[in-house]
Image (cartoon, helix red, strand yellow):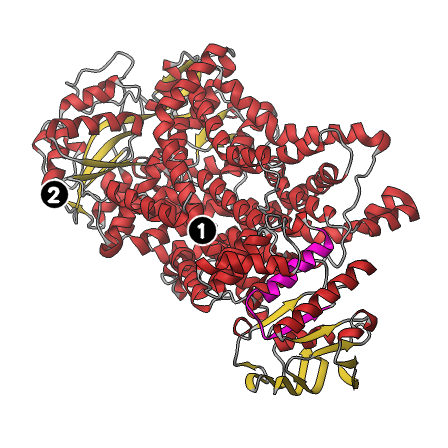
């Protein structure tokens, strides 16, 4: 590791990811903490925690079998469903919620849990799939000989669970921080409020920003409590991976269960992605007033005409954020893994930008960058780029750290013995060797930046993003155009990953 | 003169002493064979000499220069002029680099002028008989070819000390014999000091000037051949 | 792609594109669809370079007001705040954030829409109305704001959560107009019925409009501009202005103000003068926003009910603005359970 490079990386991470949060934290004084855990807000927090657990459980129950089926069995077109299984995580959960609210009468807490569970199951599926693929073929064969597929799965599930649970903690975190889905889904029937509502409401009801920041602390603590075991689970999931002379497991034949398995996979995809996308297409084509292709075309034309510049801005910000986050994440992620105990101690710090509600991050961004000396940055598109980079940098760091853990240390040692210094080793040896993770995590930053609104809404550059236009259009009920614009956003979000999958043989490593 | 001296060297891994104390002098230009059962500390010994693992006590001297004193590393691995061939067919090779790019990388790291690199690469390729395979990446080479690339890479920067960690392990008998002879040829021609770790003493006995047997992390037997 | 060359190029492009200082910075929470064209026209007519920034209607948006307050603490940036409602602006005036300016264009605006100290001026308003689905209910049966709680309509009525936007100001105004006890009773009743599902709580006024127009609710509180969107699209809806014989209904104007620390006050005054002209009110009335001119003399389309066409609540907005945060905290306690 290059100390100067690592220090530079830490400095960049501190500036982009930690400083906005620190500035917010400094506003809180002892008096603001009073009443933080009132009976009402405690009840909200408890309900929110239950929501998170429910969503995580749903993600596990759906994601583990899904991941297993598409990675290890002879389900027809398994490879296609594996790629398609990523779609739900790319769709804004509110879009999924709106579709299901329009198609069913399911409302309230149960509906919220199901929607958020379905939106986050791809995380569990991706991790579970990878974990199943890393089971040594000989271990599996030994179990199959003892008692067939059921016995093999019984033996393998404990090996897969650390990875699956790690992903489920992220499903938990995403669920408890979601505001829009619970609000929308309980618009009809009993209102179901969550703690994220409390955070937003506090900004409107508190003159004292310290009190408003303090109101977010319980949610931050809950998020941190979930992310802490995540690091340990991640460490364990890496330990159960390849060892020695690994032999890849064979494809498992399901026999008569092949077609029911396919139905399960398709049902999951329909519920989580195809139905919402289908509904968007239907709305773009006229929706309840009658679908027609001419209306569909007109909707897309209008969406392109009005949203073209916004799409270009969003794409630019997202690409910029990825280009900034990836080099910093490469340096820090590699250092985190190679630094041993020190790295394990610093790992929780990496998660801080994710643990904080987006609104705090956004307001912290104003406090940090809206100063005379940095005013030009604040006023420009750079503000959105830096905000996104800082917020999503943890994904890059964790993905690179995980990939580094899988990299044979001798690859770096031989470069060291060959005379290459740490910076040269990182750039010429480590980065190319980790290219699936480098590119994959860059794509994650890109996708999340395209979808981000909560943190960005507070800065000048937000006005030019496509999500900003989308929300404004929703307000005025321009359904066809809104649906078409939402489909365009989805297309641009999934396009890079889709192109990579179609034209590149190497599978991307997007997982932290 | 001794190319390598180990004074009271001790290495711990996970709080457990896996090597040492070791006292050893290796004269320049000699071939020393290290044998012993699995877990006896042979690989750890090579890694400690290369500076890839820090000892808890003792000194490593390279041609009378202190390379490490206890955990303090005075000469980092990249400046020790050591070539190391790892255990396993082509282990530690850079998967994204062709044979040519691999050797080019080492030469560039040692600031060999661009004008000289092509010639040096050609010499190395000739030395390990990899002519015609310069454009291939590790994934496109056989086990024997990969080990020869690893050898060429270890020699590219003109090391004084060559460390071989079971270099012949994954190869069949005929290839083992050929590669061993080739390595010995290089050792002789370049006047290298070679430390060869193996669990099979027969594979390099004809070339060894001395044999050191390790058991439980300590020298059990040391004899001149 | 040569990364070492790309980054500086991107950076240069960004900074070059954005580094020119504008002549005026306007923050506008009236929907971009309507305000943007007007602001661009002002820029064309005056030759001033105007940087306009907009807002989104979403409960989760803390609003431009929060941003203005944050920026004022470090580097004031905004010159003019054009808000689509008034309570936040009144609160800002109370906190000393606004610059008094008695615009000549505002002289014919009724006094109830102007701050006594000229810190803000109201224009182009929206009324709070019940949007009623005529396929589900006879609008004649809806006469009072209290009909929202009639057990006949259990589960068929809707309101936006009163923690943001005009619903927030509306509920806060009830305390002033009905008195503390009655105002609280209205809000507490709404909160109680929301919890058991008798009253549907939507994500915003536009969502209430969609619920009613799609038949998922019979009627609900919304603004006249949202109602107009449904009417314009041909849905079976009408607007009911409740309590015509009683306290009337809330009329919420757009408000415009100059920030005390505005870096470009001259340009700010020019813009305020331009916006407050009757022609702009007329244009906003003609637009899909269907804003109600506060001046009775300003021409408007037939479907836009003028201020004389319904009874507007007499609200002491100064008092409402002063107490808005306290009220919002109370609504938070009632609705977030």
Which quarter of the figure has residue C33?
top left
Chain ID, mark 1: A
Q: CA distance from mark 2 to mark 1?
A: 40 Å
Residue B195's place in the image compared with A192, above or below, is: below
Q: Which mark is residue C265?
A: 2
Residues at discs 2 and 1 both on one chain? no
Q: Horizontal placement of A345 versus B25: left or right?
A: left
For the residue carrying disc 1, how many other residues have a C-alpha within 10 Å: few (<14), some (14-19), or many (20+)?
many
For image coordinates 61% across by 87% down, the residue present is B1
For residue A327, say whether it is visible.
Answer: yes
Q: Which residues are magenta?
A: B142-165
Disc 2 is placed on an element classified as helix
Q: Nearer the viewer, residue A221 or A414?
A: A414
Q: Which mark is residue A22?
A: none
Which quarter of the figure has residue A334?
bottom right
Q: Horizontal placement of B55 versus A323: left or right?
A: right
Q: Nearer the viewer, residue A457 or A183?
A: A457
Residue C82's place in the image compared with B213, above or below, is: above
């Amino acid at each position: 590791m290059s100390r100067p490079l690592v220090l530079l990386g830490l400095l960049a991470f501190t500036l982009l990811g930690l400083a906005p949060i620190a500035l917010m934290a400094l506003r809180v004084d002892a008096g603001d903490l009073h009443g933080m855990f009132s009976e009402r807000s405690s009840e909200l927090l408890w309900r929110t925690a239950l929501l998170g657990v429910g969503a995580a459980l749903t993600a596990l129950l759906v994601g583990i079998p899904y991941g297993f089926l598409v990675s290890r069995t002879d389900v027809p077109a398994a490879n296609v469903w594996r790629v398609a299984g990523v779609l739900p995580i790319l769709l804004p959960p509110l879009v999924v919620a709106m579709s299901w609210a329009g198609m069913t009468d399911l409302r309230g807490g149960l509906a919220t849990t199901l929607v958020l569970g379905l939106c986050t199951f791809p995380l569990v599926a991706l991790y579970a799939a990878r974990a199943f693929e890393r089971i040594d073929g000989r271990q599996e064969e030994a179990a199959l000989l003892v008692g067939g597929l059921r016995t093999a799965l019984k033996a393998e599930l404990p090996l897969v669970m650390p990875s699956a649970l790690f992903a489920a903690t992220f499903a938990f975190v995403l669920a408890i921080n979601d505001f829009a889905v619970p609000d929308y889904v309980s618009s009809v029937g009993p209102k179901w409020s969550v703690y994220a509502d409390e955070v937003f409401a506090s900004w409107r009801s508190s003159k004292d920003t310290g009190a408003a920041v303090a109101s977010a602390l319980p949610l931050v603590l809950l998020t941190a409590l979930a992310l802490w075991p995540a690091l340990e689970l991640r460490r364990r999931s890496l330990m159960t991976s390849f060892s020695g002379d690994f032999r890849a497991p064979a494809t498992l034949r399901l026999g008569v269960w092949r077609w029911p398995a396919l139905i399960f996979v398709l049902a999951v995809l329909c519920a989580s992605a195809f139905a919402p996308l289908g509904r968007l297409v239907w709305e773009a084509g006229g929706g309840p007033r009658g679908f027609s292709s001419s209306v569909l075309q007109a909707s897309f034309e209008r969406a392109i005409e009005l949203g073209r510049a916004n799409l270009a801005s969003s794409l630019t910000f997202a690409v910029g954020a990825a280009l900034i986050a990836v080099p910093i994440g490469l340096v820090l992620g590699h250092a985190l893994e190679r630094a041993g105990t020190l790295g394990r101690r610093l790992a929780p710090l990496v998660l801080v930008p994710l643990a904080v509600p987006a609104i705090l991050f956004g307001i912290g961004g104003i406090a940090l960058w809206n100063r005379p000396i940095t005013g030009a940055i604040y006023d420009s598109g750079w503000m959105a780029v830096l905000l996104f980079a800082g917020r999503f940098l943890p994904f890059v760091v964790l993905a690179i750290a995980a990939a580094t853990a899988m990299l044979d240390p001798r690859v770096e040692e031989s470069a060291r013995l060959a005379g290459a210094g740490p910076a040269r080793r990182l750039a010429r040896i480590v980065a190319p060797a980790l290219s699936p993770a480098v590119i994959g995590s860059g794509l994650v930053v890109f996708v999340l930046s395209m979808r981000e609104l909560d943190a960005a809404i507070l800065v000048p550059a937000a006005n030019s993003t496509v999500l900003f236009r989308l929300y404004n259009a929703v307000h005025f009920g321009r359904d066809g155009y809104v649906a078409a614009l939402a489909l365009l956003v989805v297309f641009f979000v999934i396009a890079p990953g889709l192109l990579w999958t179609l034209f590149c043989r190497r599978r991307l490593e997007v997982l932290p | 003169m001794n190319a390598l001296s180990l004074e009271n060297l001790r290495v711990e891994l996970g709080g457990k002493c896996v090597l040492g104390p070791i006292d050893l002098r290796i004269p320049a230009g000699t071939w020393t064979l290290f044998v012993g059962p699995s877990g006896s500390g042979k690989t750890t010994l090579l890694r400690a000499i290369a500076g890839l693992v820090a000892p808890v006590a003792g000194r490593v001297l390279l041609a009378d220069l202190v390379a490490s004193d206890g955990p303090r590393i005075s000469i980092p691995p990249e400046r020790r002029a050591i070539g190391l061939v790892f255990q396993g067919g082509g282990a530690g090779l850079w998967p994204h680099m062709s044979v040519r790019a691999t050797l080019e990388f080492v030469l560039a790291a040692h600031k060999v002028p661009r004008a000289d690199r092509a010639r040096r690469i050609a010499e190395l390729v000739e030395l390990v008989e990899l002519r015609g395979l310069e454009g291939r990446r590790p994934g496109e080479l056989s086990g024997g070819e990969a080990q020869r690339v690893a050898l060429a890479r270890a020699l590219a920067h003109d090391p004084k000390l060559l460390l071989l960690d079971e270099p012949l392990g994954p190869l069949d008998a005929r290839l083992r014999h050929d590669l061993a002879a080739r390595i010995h040829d290089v050792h002789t021609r370049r006047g290298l000091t070679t430390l060869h770790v193996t669990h099979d003493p027969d594979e390099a006995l004809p070339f060894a000037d001395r044999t050191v047997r390790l058991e439980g992390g300590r020298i059990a037997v040391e004899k001149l051949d | 792609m040569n990364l070492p060359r790309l980054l500086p190029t991107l950076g240069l492009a960004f900074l070059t594109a954005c580094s020119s200082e504008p002549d005026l910075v306007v923050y506008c929470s009236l929907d971009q669809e309507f305000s943007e064209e007007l602001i661009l026209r002002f820029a064309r007519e005056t030759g001033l370079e105007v940087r306009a920034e907009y807002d989104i209607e979403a409960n989760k948006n803390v609003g431009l007001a929060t941003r203005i307050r944050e920026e004022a603490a470090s580097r004031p940036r905004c010159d003019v705040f054009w808000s689509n409602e008034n309570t936040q602006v009144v609160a800002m005036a109370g906190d000393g954030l606004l610059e008094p300016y008695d615009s000549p264009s505002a002289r014919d605006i009724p006094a109830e829409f102007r701050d006594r100290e000229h810190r803000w001026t109201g224009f182009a308003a929206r009324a709070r109305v019940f949007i009623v689905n005529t396929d589900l209910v006879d609008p004649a049966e809806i006469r009072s704001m209290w009909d929202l709680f009639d057990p006949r309509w259990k589960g068929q009525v809707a309101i936006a959560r009163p923690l943001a936007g005009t619903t927030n100001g509306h509920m806060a105004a009830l305390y002033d107009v009905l008195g503390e006890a009655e105002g609280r009773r209205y809000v507490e009743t709404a909160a109680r019925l929301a919890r058991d599902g008798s009253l549907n709580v939507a994500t915003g006024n536009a969502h209430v409009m969609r619920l009613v127009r799609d038949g998922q609710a019979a009627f609900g509180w919304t603004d006249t501009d949202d109602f107009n969107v449904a009417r314009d699209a041909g849905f079976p809806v009408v607007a009911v202005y409740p309590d015509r014989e009683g306290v009337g209904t809330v009329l919420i104007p757009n408000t415009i103000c100059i920030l005390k620390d505005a870096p470009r006050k001259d340009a700010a005054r020019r813009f305020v003068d331009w916006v407050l002209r009757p022609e702009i009110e007329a244009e906003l009335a003609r637009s899909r926003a269907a804003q109600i001119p506060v001046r009775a003399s300003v021409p408007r389309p037939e479907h836009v009910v003028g201020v004389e066409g319904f009874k507007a609540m007499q609200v002491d907005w100064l008092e409402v603005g002063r107490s808005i945060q306290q009220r919002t905290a109370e609504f938070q306690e009632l609705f977030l359970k």
